[in-house]
Image (cartoon, rainbow, N blue to C red):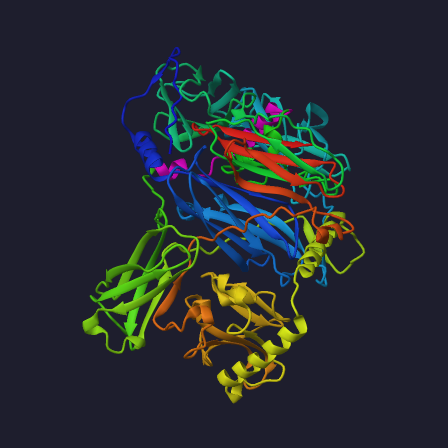
C-alpha cells in the first residue's frame, strides 16, 4: 500500500499530538492489519442473452492505487438463488486481469450476479466484495424478465458529525433509498412538532440520492422532516434528540484542502485534551491535539504530499479520555479530480452501415496499454444507474450502502455539494474505532499467495505414502517433459507453490525405480490452495421481476438474439464437409464403442452418447468434461457447488455420476484429463441406472493416432488460471457475412490490453453494425505513477 500523508498547519490551540495512548496503538493496529483492497469489473455489456460471451476486465486496487504484487482474483457467476453457476480464476499483473464467461443455452432467463474478490478481501465483511447485477435473457424460458417501475422509497436524516447539539448551527443531510429508481425530484421541509403548520426551513433534493439543509436546534424541541416526491408519496422522519452538551464537527473540502471546525456546548473544560484524527486508506493522514479550553477550534488540513490523490478522508474526534465523540467523512478535492484524458490522433467516425472505422491514441511512454470498449447504444436502454471505474475506486469500493448512479459524482457537471452531503450521510465501515481502541484485530483466515499453489496426495493401493520420493513429469502446450522430484511429508503430501500458467498441465507421476513395482496402482490427486470462498450473505435485490407475459419486447434483447442467430448462420455456412457419409461412419464407430464399454445395466436405446475416441475432438481443449457437457444434451443442466464442482441435473432432478460404471462424486471427475476419456453416456431416467451421467475411460489402444499409443495411467490434471476468450472482429467483407440481412451487433470492439504495434500507435479497429449512430467509447489506463486515464463518451 502506498503511504499517504497530509501535512498539517499549526493553528492557535492545535498542535501535533505525540503522546502515546490507546489512539496511537489503535492507529498502529489499523495500518498493520486493515489494508483495504477493492475491485472493479468492466463488462462489455450490461445485459446479455444466452449464447453470448461476457467479456470482462478486472481492476484491483490497494487503497487508491492498483495492487502492485501479483495475486489472484476470483470472479464468480451466481443465479438469484445464490447457486454458483460458473467461476473464473484470474491472474492479476499490476492489479489488472481479464476473462470470459460463456452463457450456455441451459441458463434460464433471470437476474444473475457477478461477484469478484481477492483472498485478502475474504478476511473482511462480504459487503466489500464486488457485486454486479446482470440480466440474462433466454427466448426459450417460460418466464420473461421485466424491469420494475416501482418507485417506493425510504428516507433518513443525518446531522453533520453525527451529533445534534443545543444552539450549534448544524448541516443535516437527507438521504433517499430505493430498491428501484428513486424519484426524479423530491423536496421537503422541517417543523417543530409543537407547531406542525409552521415550516422552519424548506429544502429540495440535490439529486436522486441526497438533499441538505441547516438548522440551529434548541434543547427540548422535537423536530420532524416531511419529505414528498413528485408523485405525492410522503414520509415523515423524526430528527435525533437535541443534546444539552457535546461537540459538533463541521468540514468543507476544496482544492486547497479540508477546512474543519469543532464547536462544543456545556463542556466544563471546553475542548481541552480533545484529539482530531484523519485517516485515508485506513492509514493515518493527520493527527492533532487541542491544548486550550476554548469552546471552538478550527484549522485547515492542506493537501501537499498527496496533491494527486482523490478519495475519502475520515475525520474522527476523541475526548480527553480517548472516547470517540464525533466523526465526519470528506471527499478530497471534489472539484479537482485527478484524471487524465487520452490524446486522440484525430477521431472522425463514419456512420455508414458496416463501414470500417478506427481511431488512434497518441503514443505515450507513460502508458503501457489501454482497455478499450466500443459498443452501440442506439437501441440499448439508457443506464440511469451508472457505475464506472471512478465511482468504484473513489466511492462504492468503500461505501457499502446503495447509491443510485454513483458515476454522476465524478462527471464533468458533477454537483460537489451533493457529494459532500452524501459524505455526511455515510459512515466508514471498513473498521470500527471501538474495536481498534480495545485492541481487537481482524481474524486472518486466508493468506494471499502470489500465484497458484497446489497440495498433492499420493497413494498406492489406497494407502498414503509418507516420506516418499515421487517423480513428476509435467506436460502442456508450453511445457514438454518438465521433470521434478518431490518428497512427500509425514502425511503423504507434496506441495507445488507459486505457479503461473493458463493452459492445463498433465502431471505424470512415478516412484523411484527401487519402488516401481505395481506402479499402475498409484493414484495422485491435487487440491488447489487458492480456493473460492462461498458467499454466505444475501444477494442484493434487483429492480427486475419474472412474468409469464411475453408480449413486452425489449429491442436490445431482440437485436442480441438476432446477432446470435447471425453468428450461427455464418458458422454453419463455413462447415463444408460431407455430412451424411461422415455422420454414418461415426455412428457405426460410436455404436461399436458403446457396445465395448457399456454393461447391460447401462444399456439404453434412448441414451445420448458422446464419443471422444472417434469424434468430439474439440473437447480436448476443455478443462473438465462436465463443463464441456453444458448445453450439449437436452434436459441436462449443471450447477456449481461451493468447491467449484459441476453437479449434473436431468429435468430438474440431480443425476448420478459414474466413472467406468462405479458411483463417484463430482470432485473425482475434476482431475481426469479429457484425453483419458473414451465416452460419456447421458441416461434420462432410463435403464437400471436412472438419471445418470456415465463416464468411461480409455482402454488399451483406444487413443487416437496422435496419442501414439501412449500409456494413459498415472496421470492427473492441474487447472491453471482461466484464459480469456479473445474477441474476434467479424469479417464484414466475407461472402458469408454479406448474406446477413440485418447486422445487430452491440459489441463492436473489445480489447483489454491495447498497446503499440511496431511503427503504429495504439489503434482500435472495428466495423459498424447496420445502425451504429451512437457508439459508446470507454478507454481506461494508468500511468507510471498510477494516475488514472479515463474516457467515456458517445460518438
Q: Residue 394's spot in the image, x, y percent?
A: 51, 32
Locate the C terminus by quadrant: top right
Furthest residue in direction left, as rendered? 514
The count of marks equals: 0
Q: Is residue 701 above or below residue 5?
A: below
Above or below, comparing residue 725 to residue 185 in the picture: below
Nearest to the observer: residue 406 or residue 494: 494
In the picture provided, is 687 more to the left or to the right than 144?
Answer: left
Residue at (44% x, 18% y) in the render: 303
Evaluate whether residue 38 shows in this view.
Answer: yes
> Is residue 793 highlighted in magenta?
no
Quarter the N terminus occupies = top left
Residue 527 on image: x %, y %: 36, 62
Say above or below: 476 vs 183: below
Q: Hey, which residue is sitting farthest bottom in the picture?
A: 600
Q: Is residue 525 left or right of residue 64?
A: left
Residue at 21% across / 67% down in the picture? 468
Answer yes or no: is residue 241 visible: no
Horizontal and vertical percent position of residue 722: 47, 53
Q: Could you say which is closer to the camera, residue 496 or residue 179?
A: 496
Residue 473 in which image quadrant: bottom left
Viewer-nearest residue: 471 or 402: 471
Residue 470: give x, y in percent of width and height: 25, 65
The quarter holding residue 692 reads bottom right
Magenta residues, dominant SS class: helix
Q: Is residue 660 left or right of residue 111?
A: left
The magenta stretch spans residue 416: yes
The magenta segment? 413-437
User: Where 273 sits versus 770, above or below?
Assistant: above
Tell which of 250 and 411 is nearer to you.
Answer: 411
Q: Farthest residue toward the top?
A: 12
Amino acid at each position: 500500500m502506498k503511504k499517504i500523508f497530509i501535512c498539517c498547519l499549526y493553528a492557535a490551540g492545535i498542535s501535533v499530538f505525540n503522546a502515546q495512548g490507546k489512539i496511537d496503538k489503535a492507529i498502529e493496529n489499523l495500518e498493520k492489519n486493515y489494508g483495504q483492497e477493492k475491485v472493479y469489473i468492466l463488462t462489455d455489456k450490461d445485459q446479455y442473452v444466452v449464447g453470448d460471451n461476457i467479456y470482462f476486465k478486472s481492476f484491483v486496487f490497494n487503497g487508491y492505487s492498483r495492487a502492485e504484487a501479483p495475486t489472484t482474483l476470483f470472479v464468480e457467476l451466481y443465479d438469484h438463488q445464490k447457486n454458483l453457476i460458473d467461476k473464473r480464476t484470474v491472474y492479476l499483473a499490476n492489479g489488472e486481469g481479464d476473462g470470459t464467461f460463456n452463457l450456455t443455452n441451459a441458463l434460464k432467463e433471470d437476474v444473475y450476479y457477478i461477484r469478484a474478490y481477492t483472498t485478502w478481501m475474504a478476511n473482511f465483511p462480504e459487503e466489500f466484495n464486488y457485486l454486479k447485477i446482470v440480466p440474462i435473457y433466454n427466448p426459450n424460458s417460460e418466464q420473461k424478465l421485466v424491469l420494475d417501475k416501482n418507485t417506493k422509497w425510504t428516507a433518513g436524516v443525518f446531522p453533520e458529525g453525527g451529533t445534534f447539539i443545543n444552539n450549534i448551527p448544524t448541516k443535516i443531510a437527507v438521504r433517499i433509498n430505493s430498491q428501484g429508481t428513486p424519484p426524479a425530484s423530491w423536496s421537503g421541509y422541517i417543523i417543530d412538532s409543537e407547531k406542525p403548520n409552521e415550516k422552519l426551513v424548506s429544502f429540495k433534493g440535490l439529486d436522486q440520492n441526497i438533499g441538505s439543509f441547516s438548522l440551529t436546534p434548541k434543547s427540548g424541541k422535537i423536530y420532524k422532516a416531511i419529505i414528498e416526491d413528485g408523485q405525492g408519496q410522503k414520509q415523515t422522519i423524526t430528527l435525533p434528540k437535541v443534546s444539552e452538551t457535546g461537540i459538533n464537527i463541521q468540514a468543507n473540502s476544496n482544492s486547497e484542502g479540508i477546512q474543519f471546525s469543532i464547536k462544543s456546548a456545556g463542556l466544563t473544560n471546553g475542548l481541552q485534551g480533545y484529539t482530531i484524527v484523519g485517516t485515508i486508506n485506513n492509514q493515518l493522514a493527520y493527527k492533532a491535539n487541542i491544548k486550550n479550553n476554548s469552546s471552538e477550534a478550527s484549522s485547515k488540513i492542506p493537501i501537499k504530499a498527496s496533491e494527486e490523490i482523490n478519495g475519502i478522508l475520515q475525520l474522527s474526534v476523541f475526548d480527553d479520555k480517548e472516547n470517540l465523540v464525533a466523526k465526519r467523512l470528506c471527499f478530497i478535492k471534489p472539484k479537482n479530480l485527478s484524471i487524465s484524458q487520452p490524446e486522440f490522433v484525430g477521431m472522425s467516425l463514419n456512420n455508414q452501415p458496416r463501414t470500417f472505422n478506427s481511431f488512434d491514441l497518441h503514443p505515450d511512454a507513460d502508458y503501457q496499454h489501454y482497455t478499450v470498449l466500443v459498443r452501440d447504444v442506439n437501441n440499448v436502454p439508457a443506464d440511469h444507474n451508472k457505475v464506472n471505474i471512478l465511482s468504484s475506486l473513489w466511492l462504492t469500493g468503500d461505501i457499502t450502502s446503495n447509491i443510485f448512479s454513483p458515476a454522476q459524482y465524478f462527471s464533468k457537471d458533477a454537483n460537489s455539494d451533493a457529494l459532500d452531503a452524501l459524505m455526511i450521510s455515510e459512515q466508514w465501515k471498513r473498521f470500527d474505532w471501538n474495536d481498534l481502541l480495545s485492541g481487537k484485530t481482524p481474524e486472518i483466515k486466508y493468506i494471499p499467495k502470489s500465484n497458484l499453489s497446489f497440495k498433492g496426495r499420493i497413494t498406492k493401493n489406497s494407502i498414503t505414502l509418507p516420506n516418499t520420493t515421487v517423480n513428476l513429469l509435467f506436460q502442456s502446450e508450453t511445457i514438454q517433459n518438465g521433470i521434478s522430484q518431490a518428497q512427500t511429508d509425514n502425511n503423504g503430501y507434496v506441495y507445488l507453490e507459486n505457479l503461473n500458467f493458463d493452459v492445463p498441465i498433465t502431471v505424470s507421476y512415478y516412484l523411484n525405480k527401487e519402488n516401481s513395482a505395481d506402479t499402475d496402482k498409484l493414484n495422485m490427486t491435487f487440491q488447489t490452495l487458492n480456493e473460492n470462498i462461498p458467499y454466505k450473505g444475501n444477494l442484493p435485490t434487483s429492480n427486475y421481476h419474472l412474468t409469464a407475459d411475453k408480449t413486452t419486447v425489449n429491442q436490445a434483447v431482440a437485436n442480441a438474439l438476432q446477432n446470435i442467430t447471425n453468428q450461427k448462420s455464418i458458422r454453419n455456412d463455413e462447415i463444408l464437409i460431407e455430412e451424411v457419409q461422415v455422420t454414418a461412419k461415426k455412428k457405426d464407430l460410436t455404436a461399436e464403442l458403446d457396445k465395448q464399454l457399456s454393461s447391460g445395466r447401462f444399456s439404453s436405446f434412448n441414451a445420448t452418447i458422446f464419443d471422444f475416441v472417434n469424434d468430439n475432438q474439440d473437447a480436448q481443449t476443455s478443462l473438465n468434461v462436465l463443463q464441456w457437457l453444458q448445453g450439449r444434451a437436452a434436459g441436462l443442466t449443471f450447477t456449481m457447488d461451493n468447491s467449484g464442482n459441476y453437479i449434473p441435473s436431468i429435468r430438474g432432478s440431480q443425476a448420478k455420476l459414474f466413472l467406468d460404471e462405479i458411483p463417484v462424486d463430482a470432485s473425482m471427475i475434476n482431475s481426469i484429463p479429457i484425453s483419458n476419456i473414451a465416452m460419456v453416456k447421458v441416461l434420462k431416467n432410463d435403464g437400471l441406472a436412472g438419471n445418470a451421467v456415465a463416464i468411461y475411460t480409455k482402454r488399451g489402444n483406444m487413443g487416437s493416432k496422435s496419442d501414439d499409443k501412449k500409456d494413459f495411467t498415472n496421470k492427473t490434471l492441474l487447472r491453471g488460471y482461466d484464459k480469456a476468450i479473445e474477441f474476434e472482429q467479424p469479417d464484414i467483407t466475407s461472402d458469408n457475412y454479406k448474406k446477413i440481412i440485418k447486422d445487430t451487433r452491440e459489441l463492436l470492439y473489445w480489447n483489454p490490453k491495447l498497446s503499440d504495434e511496431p511503427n503504429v500507435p495504439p489503434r482500435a479497429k472495428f466495423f459498424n453494425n447496420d445502425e451504429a449512430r451512437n457508439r459508446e467509447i470507454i478507454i481506461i489506463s494508468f500511468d507510471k505513477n498510477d494516475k488514472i486515464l479515463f474516457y467515456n463518451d458517445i460518438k
